[in-house]
Image: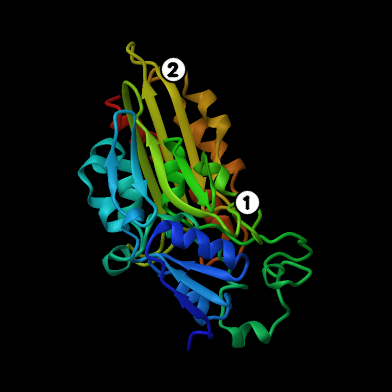
Amino acid sequence: MRLPPFQYLLPGTVKEALDMLHAHKGKLCIAAGGTDVVNRLRQRLLTPSYVMSLKDLPELQGIKKRKNELLISAGTSLREIAEDPDVCALFGAVALSAGLVAAPPVRNIATLGGNILQETRCLFYDQSELVRKAALPCLKQGGKVCLAQKGATRCLSVYQGDLAPALIAFDAKAVLKKAGASRTVPVLALFSGKGKQPFTVEDDELLTRVAIPMPKGRYGASYEKLRMRKGLDYPFACAAAFVSLSAKGVIDRARLVVGAVGPAPVLVEEASAHLVGRTPADADCEAAAACAVKSAHAIDNLALPAAYRRKMVKVIARRAINGALSGAGA
């Protein structure tokens, strides 16, 4: 399928990119690695007047270690993240989540920012223009009903990014810039929870980097992903867990995040009650994992049945928690 007509923009600096975003607000699409955007353009799911490439912006690439945090620029490739010594040593779950995305050729060009801000997906929406025209328009296309579930009046498309759950488990922050201003928000706050408009990022804002705070004391984290094949597939459900231990060996902090079960990653706050204040041996991992099931709103709009995906949420959540405890030396 051919790409739709558009004007190609190639800024030389971040400032130029922000000026272009401001000048063409609402008419511009950002292409980082392009692994998701190009397919959406071919399917006419995107028909922007302008496409702005970020490939020539060294300011948006690289990983830097500071005393209290690790900074990963938004244009850094997933391969770099998966193989970086500091990411692997300090935030292994983030490296693992990056290394599980698609296949090596994709990871070589796909970026952190692109993976975090990839659009929600649905079998009724992610189709060619020819197929979509043969059916009623869904809510994400401007229709009045969600085709994935009879009677639904809100879009139920699914967010399937890999890195966001792992970053949220570490309570990472995202830096957003626009012409003349910038703001820093938790990665979790980038998501609206609405399938039709899944992100809170404004049309003239650019995600420039992610900052991951250095945890204190003994800690561990893990990421688990449900997929049909070892390569290529988006997660049909995923879970990231983080735990830290006090000097006495008691869990003093725990975070469980599940993804690909709704329009946004979900921080399962109830899970921490079954972990915090207990030793790893006394932690009720089963009960904590069961809390994740309550956050799973899977429906039959992906290749795997919703009932199976909901059952597997508990399994991969439990594996993630156990992996985090193991990583903490428990």
Q: Nearer the viewer, residue 180 or 223?
A: 180
Q: Nearer the viewer, residue 116 or 263?
A: 116
Where is the C terminus found, in terms of image quarters?
Answer: top left
- Circle 2 sits on which residue? 278
Percent coordinates x, y for residue 25 in the rendering: 61, 65
Q: Secondary structure at mark 2?
A: loop
Q: Report crowding for label 2: few under 14, some 14 to 19, many 20 or more residues within 10 A (C-alpha).
A: some
Q: Which mark is residue 297?
A: 1
Placement of 245 over or under 85, stated as above or below: above
Percent coordinates x, y for residue 307 in the rendering: 58, 56
Q: Nearer the viewer, residue 120 or 49?
A: 49
Q: Amino acid at mark 2?
A: Arg
Q: Report crowding for label 1: few under 14, some 14 to 19, many 20 or more residues within 10 A (C-alpha).
A: some
Percent coordinates x, y for residue 308 in the rendering: 53, 56
The residue lying at 52 percent from left, 81 percent from top is 6
Q: Amino acid at mark 1?
A: His
The mark nearer the N terminus, 1 or 2, is: 2
192 sits to left or right of 3: right
